[in-house]
Structures are given as C-alpha cells and as structure tokens.
Amino acid sequence: MKKDDKTQSILLFGGFIQEFLEKIPHLKNQNNVFLLSPLNFNPAPNIRQFLYEVGCEEVVLALLAESLLKQDDTQEKQWIKDLDVGYLASEVNFSEEEIMAISQSFVESTKGVLIIGKDIYGHKRASNIAKILGLLAKNPKIEIVFLDEVWVQAVEQIEEIAKLGEIDNFDGLVAYVHFDEGLEYPILQASRQFALVGKIANGDTIEIEFANQKIKANFCEQQEIKGMVGILWLSKQEDIGFCYQKIRVNRIS
C-alpha cells in the first residue's frame, strides 16, 4: 500500500477504527476509504462506513469476493456462483447497493487495498475467512494488508473454501471488548439507545455478565457511538474468544 496514493481504494475490515487510524495515520487524509464494521463508531469524516450484523464477517467477506471476483477465472468459481447474494445480504444487513459501492470503487481505482485488523482471529470461522482472503489476494488488482503479520502465512496457503457457516444470533446488548493496560477500572461506552434498553445511565457503576464471567465497570454514554453495540474497555488482556460478546448489564449504583 502506497502512502497517500489518491488513486487507491481502501477497505478497512475486521478491526477497530482507532487502531487503523493509529497505525496508518494518513488514512484521515485519504480518498476512497471504506470501513466495514458492526460497531457504529467512526471518528473520521472522510471514511465511509457500512454496517453489518455482529459475527457475520465470513458472509460479508464472501459477498465482497462474489462482487469482486465473479468475472475472474478462479479455482473457486463454482463456490462463488453458488452464493445466494440476495438472501445472504439480507441476512447480514449488508445491502447489495453497499457491496456495489465498494466493488465499483475498487474497479475504478489503480489498486484496491483490503486492510485486515485482528478482530477476526478469534472468530469461530477464522480458518474459512483466511481462505476467502487468500482467494481475493490472487487478484492482481487487490492487495491484502494485515495490521498483524500473524495471518500472512495462513492466507498464502490456499485451500478449498468450505461452505459458509450458520449465522449466529447477537440480538440484544453487545459489547466490543477492547484492552487498554493504562486503565484503572473497566469502562463500558455506549449510546443513549443502549443505555435505555439496559436501564442504565451515564456515570452508573454496573455489573456486566458475559463469557461466563461477571465484572464491575463504569458506564459512560457516548454520543459518537450509535446503536446496540458498545465498547467495553478492560485493563487486563485475556482470552475471551471473539471480540464481540453478548452481555447483560445491571445497575449497582
């Protein structure tokens, strides 16, 4: 990826927008940048965000592959052909118009760059996601860039792509779990809508139940965050599996 190349189209996927911006600062001044994330939070006005349902990264990537590669003569042509685009797009709440906007931008640019964050490493379908990324990487006009180099080797080893897995249900309150060693106490940041559903208010001390554990945290209402997915900041790094977790909240004080 060339720095400040205005002719590139860039898609940020599978990561936290703040990490993308911290590691690649020039994204704030770049044209044709898209963010795909179920967390409705985007502090960069030049970046166009599209939302999708939590946990549906495999399907979202498959839909992008279908749009970008359907004219290519790939070894996975039948897999691409078998995708029911209309049904899948509806199921994950990622419209065909949004898919087309991204793919059209990639087609019209000198190169399409797909920047992958670390969120998908803990996804239960991570292996198949890597295979789909490997398929995309075979297109000479698409460059795959990883914020974490751990996945580079996995993507280079192309294997047959499996059928898409079942779509999990993340209805209700969801937290995007992130870690900051500088924190003294856990913080849950979320929208007014989130607070109303959870029956909590700004400044409350709350108990959060998720991933077979309970923790105490401070709740902070954030206008910049929309919808039913909040950000749960923890000070201690731990293995919780996938970074998006269904949660229950109770007000303590």
Image: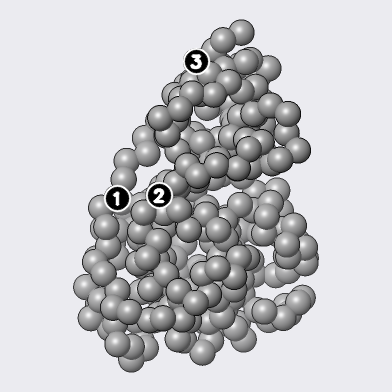
Tag of residue 77:
none
- Say which label, 2 or 3, has the lower sequence index: 2
Q: Position of residue 94 (x, y in %)?
A: 41, 56
Residue at 73%, 65% (x, y): give it.
24
Identified by mark 2, the residue type is Gly
Question: Residue 167 shows which numbered tag?
Answer: 1
Residue at 73 percent across and 69 percent down: it is: 30
Q: CA distance from mark 1 to mark 2?
A: 7 Å
Coordinates of residue 48 in the picture (x, y in percent) = 61, 58
- In the figure, 208 relative to 7: above or below? above
| First in sequence: mark 1 vs mark 3 | 1
**What label does residue 55 carry, if any?**
2
Element marked by disc 2: loop
**Alpha carbon separation for disc pair 2 and 3:** 24 Å
State left or right for residue 52 relative to residue 81: right
- Front one among 234 and 174: 234
Is any part of residue 50 visible from this angle? no
In the image, which is nearer the foreground, mark 1 or mark 3? Answer: 3
Amino acid type of the residue that numbered disc 1 sits on in the rendered structure:
Ile
Residue 206 screen position, x and y as percent: 57, 17
